[in-house]
Image (spheres, helix red, strand yellow):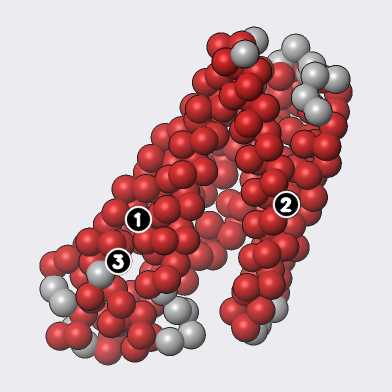
Amino acid sequence: MKQRARISGIAYLIIFISGFYANFYAVENLIDLNNINETIQNLNENTSQLGYGIIGFIVMLIFDLLLVWSLYKLFKWVSRNISITASILRFINVLFFCAALLNLFEVYNIISNKKLNSQSIETQQTIMSLLKKFNEIWTLGLMIFGIHLAFLCYLIFKSNNVPKPIGILLFIGAIGYFIDGFANIFISNYLDYKDIFTIIVIIPAIFGEFSFTLWLLIKGFK
């Protein structure tokens, strides 16, 4: 139990660090899906930053795969079937993000081989299309991740081991992923309200998942 908690806690912590760096620092501030000229210029001037972001995402995926196994081992005594389901859902999310990341990697290949400002309008539009696919596929994966969190909440509540407030925060986070995902898919001017929806997801997810991370580390190293 202690070893599995330790492994899960370390994996979660690395996911937090690599994911926040890759998304919010390295990639997100380069891309504006509503502004092709600014996005092209940012990518052209910060190619290495995009590359570092992709590396960060790869690190995040590796440790996410580790959590697929370690969280199953940690909670299988509560309910083997539910634990397997939660792990499968997390694995499916990893597969979705791998598919999304291929689009980002293709963008990196294009801008590495030739500066975008010397490319045709058609090539620049291809870049924007790849970035939109990256966002769309990732969004679908995060909705599946929200379902995973809901099952994880069930395991937490049934375990009588993990503090209940952590489970509540994770459940709110799961709802947040769904709200943001549906808004992204069905609201045509979603980007105008992106910051609001990001807050809906980020606040409960940070408090819930980071609290869970701390509990795992404390449990594992106590």
| Marks 3,1: beta carbons within 8 A | no
Q: Earlier in the sequence, mark 3 or mark 2?
A: 3
Residue at image mark 2: 204
Q: Residue at x 60, y 16 (%)?
A: 220
Marks 3 and 1: which is nearer the front? 1
Q: Position of residue 25 (x, y in %)?
A: 41, 61
Q: Which mark is residue 131?
A: none
Amino acid bearing label 2: Pro
Q: Quadrant of the N terminus?
A: top right
Q: Position of residue 194 (x, y in %)?
A: 62, 74
Dot 1 amino acid type: Gly
Whole-angstrom CA distance, mark 3 to mark 2, is 32 Å
**Crowdedness near tag 1: few (<14), some (14–19) or many (≥20) residues, C-alpha within 10 Å:** many
Residue matched to label 1: 53
Q: Is residue 209 visible?
A: yes
Quarter holding the C terminus?
top right
Residue that carries the numbered disc 3 in the rendered image: 107
Left or right: residue 87 compared with residue 16: right
Q: Is residue 98 above or below residue 43?
A: above
